[in-house]
Every structure is written in C-alpha cells, then in structure tokens.
Amino acid sequence: MSTTGIDATFAALGDPTRRRVLGLLAERDGATASELSRELPVTRLAIAKHLAALDAAGLVHAAREGRDVRYRVTPAPLEDAVAWMTRVGGEWDARLARLAKHAAR
Amino acid sequence: MSTTGIDATFAALGDPTRRRVLGLLAERDGATASELSRELPVTRLAIAKHLAALDAAGLVHAAREGRDVRYRVTPAPLEDAVAWMTRVGGEWDARLARLAKHAAR
DNA sequence: CACATACGCAACCCTAGGGTTGCACATCGG
DNA sequence: CCGATGTGCAACCCTAGGGTTGCGTATGTG
C-alpha cells in the first residue's frame, strides 16, 4: 500500500495550495473540485490537478457520483510521514514516535 | 516565529535530496557540507544550498568552527508540521494530536 | 428539449529552483 | 611559506510543475 511512499507524500504536501485543498477537504469531507475552487483563488482545473496529485499520493480518494466526483481524505500516508519526522528528530519525543507507529490502522 | 512557519517547513521537506541531507545530519550530527557531499550524488554547493534552505526553515542550525561550518538538527518546526497533519487527519488519532501539541517545549 | 452545471483532455505560458561550473577567499597543517 | 582543504559568490542551464485558456462531453434540472 505504501508503494508510492514517503516521497509522494512529502512532495504532495510541499505545495501550499495543495495543503489548503487538503485542509478544506478535511472540513468539508466529500466536496467536489468545483466546490473547492469557489473557496480558493485558483481555477477548478488547478484544483482538479491538485486532487489528482493527492490521490496519487494516497492522501485522498475520488468517488464518482453521477455528474460530479466527491473526494474524501484518506490520512493513512500521513502516519509514515510523521514516523519519518520523529526519526530525524532524534526521537526527541519517544512517546510521539511510539504512538505514530502504533496509530497504523 | 511562526511567520514563515509551516509553509517553509513543508517546502523544505518537499525535496527528496533535502530530506536525505536532513536524514544524514540526524545521524552524523555536526557534519559539514563537504562531508555530506561525499555521501550524496550531488555537489558540495548543492548540499550547501539545501542546508541554507533547511536553516531558513529553522530545521537546522549552522555554527562556524574555524575553517568549516558544522550543522546540527533543530527539529522544533517538525512539531508544527506534525500538528497540522493530525489536524487534517481529522484527529484520526486524538492522542497523537494531544501529544504533538503538548510536545512543544 | 434546452440550458446550466460539472468533469476531462490538450496545449500552452512561465516562473521557481535544483544542480552545475568557474573562480575567489579563508583557514589549517606540514 | 606553500599546498591542501573548506566555504562562498555569481552566472548559467534546464526541467518540473503550478496555473491558465479553449473546447468537448456527460449528467442533471427547468
């Protein structure tokens, strides 16, 4: 499942707009690209691209519903990212590292 | 302090090479740019740029020692990044979120 | 049916930035 | 003092990718 892996995750999170998209989607789960484009200063198609990238990174899942496509957050890859951070952080908080590893569902 | 904040942190972490640099530095703390460049397939100057970026993001601290400059990891900004992730994760693990926030010393 | 709405493809523009080379300067060791 | 080593600046190349517009297509609604 982690075929794409950490590289894709961090790359996806690297862009500010993409993080805003993900953030919005975290609140309005199941939103469409058009809906999100109304709340951001970019085109619908730009949002669609970002959603595609997030989808490729496994951070989001697309589900077609008739005319429109609804997206919902799938935060599993974030666990690996957190695990990496705690590692390079020198286990600066051992409890955090332990929980991050334990949080895998 | 959080003006640059999360944007800079995630941007810095977005590049694979830069993550490798940070990862190496986590093991060999206090390494110089030249040392790191010997273990990576890129130029010393490229490493130096990455270290500058990491420094700007507050993930690394440069300390001049005579002829060479030694870098050490300062993982504090990672806490904010982790906090953001847990937030967009829909508090998929409430304990993790609590600890991430609590870890800020 | 006609119109609005939502998605998708393709081509394109343009800047950011990762990486390089070439040179100059500082410092350490013999 | 001289050479080896480490850092820094500047200019440059080049690709990735964020964003756009234009158009075509499908699905919903009056």
Image (cartoon, coloured by chain):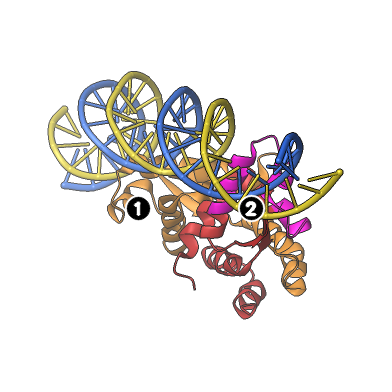
Chain colours: A red, B orange, C blue, D yellow
Q: Chain of mark 1?
A: B
Rendering coords of residue B3 (x, y %): 70, 39
Tag of residue A27: none
Position of A19 with respect to D8 (left or right) is: right
- Between B51 and A83, the one lying in front of the other is A83
Q: Amino acid at mark 1?
A: Leu
> Is residue A69 in sight in this rendering?
yes
Distance from the alpha carbon under mark 1 to that under mark 2:
22 Å
Number of numbered markers: 2
Q: Amino acid at mark 2?
A: Pro
Q: Residue at x 61, y 73 (%)?
A: A97
Q: Nearer the N terminus, badge 1 or badge 2?
A: 1
Q: Which residues are magenta?
A: A23-52
Q: Secondary structure at mark 1?
A: helix
Q: Is A42 included in the stretch rendered in magenta?
A: yes
Q: Residue at x 30, y 56 (%)?
A: B39
Q: Residue at x 59, y 62 (%)?
A: A59
- Between A90 and A17, the one lying in front of the other is A17
**Residue designated by label 2:** B77
Rendering coords of residue B72 (x, y %): 50, 54
Q: Residue at x 46, y 64 (%)?
A: A4
- The quarter in which the C terminus of chain A is drawn is bottom right
Tag of residue B36: 1
Q: Is A63 included in the stretch rendered in magenta?
A: no
Q: Nearer the viewer, mark 1 or mark 2?
A: 2
Q: Secondary structure at mark 2?
A: helix
